[in-house]
Image: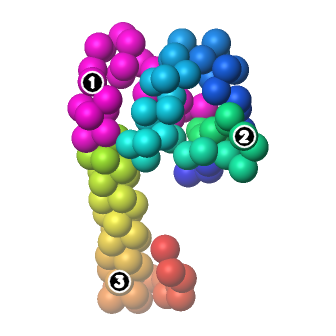
Amino acid sequence: METHLITITLRECSVQYGLSEADIREFIELGLLRPADTPEAILGETDHLARLARLHHDLGMSKEAIDIIVAMRQRLVTLQEALNRQTARTTQLERYLRGSGPTIDADL
């Protein structure tokens, strides 16, 4: 999965995603957003910013609940990646055992 990081000022983020600058600073403190090298700016993915805004505004979740949800999502993504790797390895082993294909030496 390809990641598209953007650098956006707190003000632009506030206008674009409807989060107050105070909310954005709290998200930074919780580790949900990363500060950019540029002062008063953050570095993040547009999807992640939109997700935070939706959880906070549309669903009315507290920042602590959002922190838990984001951690669970990251864990789920990690588990899905591990499952994909194991599935690929299993497929490779099955092909090898059947003699129907070459083995691929790759760290998936």
Colour style of the rendered protein structure: rainbow
In the rendered image, residue 90 lying in the magenta stretch gets the answer: no
Could you tell me which residue is drawn at 33 percent across and 71 percent down? 86
- From the viewer's perspective, is the residue at label 3 or at label 1 nearer? 1
Query: Could you tell me how far apart the alpha carbons at marks 1 and 2 are, in whole angstroms?
Result: 26 Å
Residue 5 visible (yes or no): no
Q: Identify residue for label 1.
A: 62
Q: Identify residue for label 3.
A: 93
In the rendered image, residue 57 lying in the magenta stretch gets the answer: yes
Across the whole image, how many numbered discs are drawn on residues? 3
**Which region is colored magenta?**
46-69
Up/down of 43 relative to 79, above or below:
above
Main SS of the magenta part reads: helix
Q: Is mark 1 on a helix, strand or loop?
A: loop
Residue 100 visible (yes or no): yes
Q: Is mark 2 on a helix, strand or loop?
A: loop
Residue type (three-letter) at the residue carrying disc 1: Ser
Q: Identify residue for label 2.
A: 39
Q: Where is residue 18 in the image (x, y as percent from the top left)?
A: 54, 12
Residue 23: image quadrant is: top left
Residue type (three-letter) at the residue carrying disc 2: Pro
- From the viewer's perspective, is the residue at label 2 or at label 3 nearer? 2
Query: Could you tell me how far apart the alpha carbons at marks 2 and 3 are, in whole angstroms?
Result: 51 Å
Q: Position of residue 32 (x, y in %)?
A: 44, 41
Up/down of 48 relative to 22, above or below:
below
